[in-house]
Image (tube, rainbow, N blue to C red):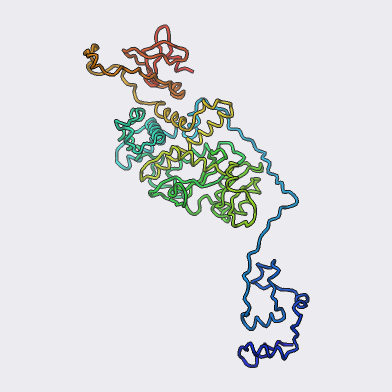
Amino acid sequence: MPAPTAALCGRTGRRPTLEEVLDNLDNSDIDLSDSETESDEEKPYEPNNDDQDNSGDENDSNDDVGIDDESDKLGPSTSTATKQQQPEIKWRANRNKFEPNATWTGNFHLGDPLETPVKYFSKYFKPEIFQTFAEETNRYYFQQKGRNLRTTADEIRKFFGVSIIMANLHFPRIRMFWHRATRIDRIVDAMQVNRYFQLRKNVHINAAREPDTQNQNKFWKMQPVMDAVRNRCLELPREEYTAVDEQMIPFTGRVPAKQFIKNNPNPVGIKSFVICGSSGRALDFELFQGKGTGIPEETKHLGLGASVVLRLTESIPRQMNYKVCFDNYFTGMPLVRELKTKGIQVLGVDKVNRLKGCELKSDKDLKKEGHMGGVDKLDFLISLYRMKAKTKKWPVTVIFHFIDLALVNSWLEYRDIERANGSPRACILDLLGYRNEVADVLLRADLDAPPPDPRPVGRPRSSSPTPQAPDQAGPPHKRAKPAERPVQDVRYDGYRHFPACIKELGQRCKYEGCKSRSRVKCVKCEVFLCLSKDKNCFLAFHTK
C-alpha cells in the first residue's frame, strides 16, 4: 500500500507536520512493534554513496528500517548522526613467501692499474681538448676585442692547474694567492694575476655566436666538454646497484635554463640528472633544459621523470638483473613495468602516507645499505674542493664543474683499483693529494717557456761580507729544505729537461741509490743530479 505520508503530501501540496505524520501512522495498519529485527533479516541492506567507504562497519545500519524510505522524503532526521571513523587498514603477509628472481648475473671489473694517478684524469680531459680550448679562446677574444689573446694549450693547462690549487686552499680572495703576505710560489711562478683574470673571463670551448639552425640544445656552447667527460663515464663498468637523482651546479646569474630547488644545499643553479654507482662514480648525466628534456617520442607518454630514467639506463646491460634506485620524483608504475621488460630491477621511494599501515624499511635503514646514496656521495666529494668563480659567465661555471666531476670520478676509479690490487692504504692518495698531483702535472708538464738562465744577471755581490760584532750578529743560517722528487708524469715526459750548474755547494743527488752531492740542477724538475765524466745520474734519473 502507498505510504500515508506520501498521500498526505500529494493531497495538501505542503510538507506535513510531525503531529500529522504520527496521526497517519496511528490510523494505518503498519505494525512497528518488534519489527526491527525481522526487517533486518528479510530485507538486505543496500548501502548508498555515503556508506560505500565504510561498508565494513557493523554499526552503520539504520535502527528505523521500517520508516527509512519515509524519512528520506520528509527531510533530515531529527536523531543526531554519530561521527564515522576512518577504516583501519591491516596488511597481511602472503602465506606463500615471495622470492623474486633478482640474482645479478653481470660482472664488474674496473681494469688494471695505470702507471701514474694522473693518467686516470687524462682519460677525461685528453691533451687534444686543451688545444681546442686555446683556439676557441683566441677566436672569442678576437671577436670581442679585435686583437689576438695569444694563448696556447700549455697556458690553458696551467690556467686549470692554478684553478685546482686555488680550490684546494680556499682563500677568501683570489688576489691573496699573489699577495706578498699570503703568496703561493707555485701559482705566482706559473701565471700573473692579471693574466689569470683575463683567461678566466674569455675561456671558451665553442666561440660560435649562434648555434646551428637544427640544434635545440640550450647548452650547445659546453657540448664538447660534456661529451669529453660523458664518453669516459660511458666506458666505466656498471655496478650491480645504481641510483638516479638530481644534481645542482650552483649559479645565480643568467643562464638558459635555471632552476630553484627548495631545501637543497645549492638551491639555485643548473639542474643535472645523474646516474651513479653505489661507489659514487658518475656513469651518465643529462642537463635539464626545461620542457622536453631527454624525452623522445616513444617515451613521451611516460612523463619527464620516467623518460630521464630510461635515457640514463640505456647503457645498463639487459636481462641481467641490474638494480636501479630512485626517489619519489621518478617512481611510477609505468616506469617500473617498462624497466621490468628490460630485465632491470627497481628500488623506488614512495611517500609513507600513500601506504598506510604497511611496514617498510625506514630511510635510515635504506641509507645503511648504501644503494641509494651514490649521487649524494658524488655531490659531497665535489663540494669539498669546488672550483668557484664569482663571474656572470655561466660557461666558466659549467667548465669548472665538469673538471671537478672528472677529478672526483678519476680519483674514485684510481682508489678502487689500487685497493683491489692490494696496495697499502698509506700509498693511496686521498682526494686532496690526488688533486694536488694533477695540478702539479698541469703546471709543469710540456711547458713551452724557455728555461731560465742559470747565470746571475748584474754586478756580482762581494764574497767577503762586512764583519759584525758578536752581539750584532743576525740569526743563524737555516739549512735549506731539500727538494722533492717530481711526479712521474713530469720526470719521464722527456721534454725540456736542461741541466744548470750553480757556484755554491749543491745538495744531495736525488737519483735513487746515489749519496753524492752535486751542483748540477735540472731546471724543470728542480732537483740536483750528478753529471760528470764518471757519473751520469742526470740521464738515469729521466729514463725509465
Residue 539 as seen in the image, left or right of residue 426: left
Image coordinates for residue 456, horizontal then vertical, percent: 27, 17
The residue under the point 60% across, 33% down is 109
Residue 215 position (above or below residue 234): below
Image coordinates for residue 367, horizontal then vertical, percent: 57, 44
The answer to which of 214 and 224 lies nearer the viewer is 224
Q: Does any portion of residue 131 appear in the rendered image?
A: no
Q: Does any portion of residue 294 appear in the rendered image?
A: yes
Q: Quadrant of residue 393?
A: top left
Residue 447 as seen in the image, left or right of residue 65: left
Residue 341 position (above or below residue 138): below
The residue under the point 47% across, 35% down is 407
Q: Residue furthest bottom?
A: 11
Residue 389 as seen in the image, left or right of residue 311: left
Residue 92 as seen in the image, left or right of residue 482: right
The answer to which of 80 and 390 lies nearer the viewer is 80
Image coordinates for residue 1, horizontal then vertical, percent: 74, 87
The answer to which of 45 and 301 lies nearer the viewer is 45
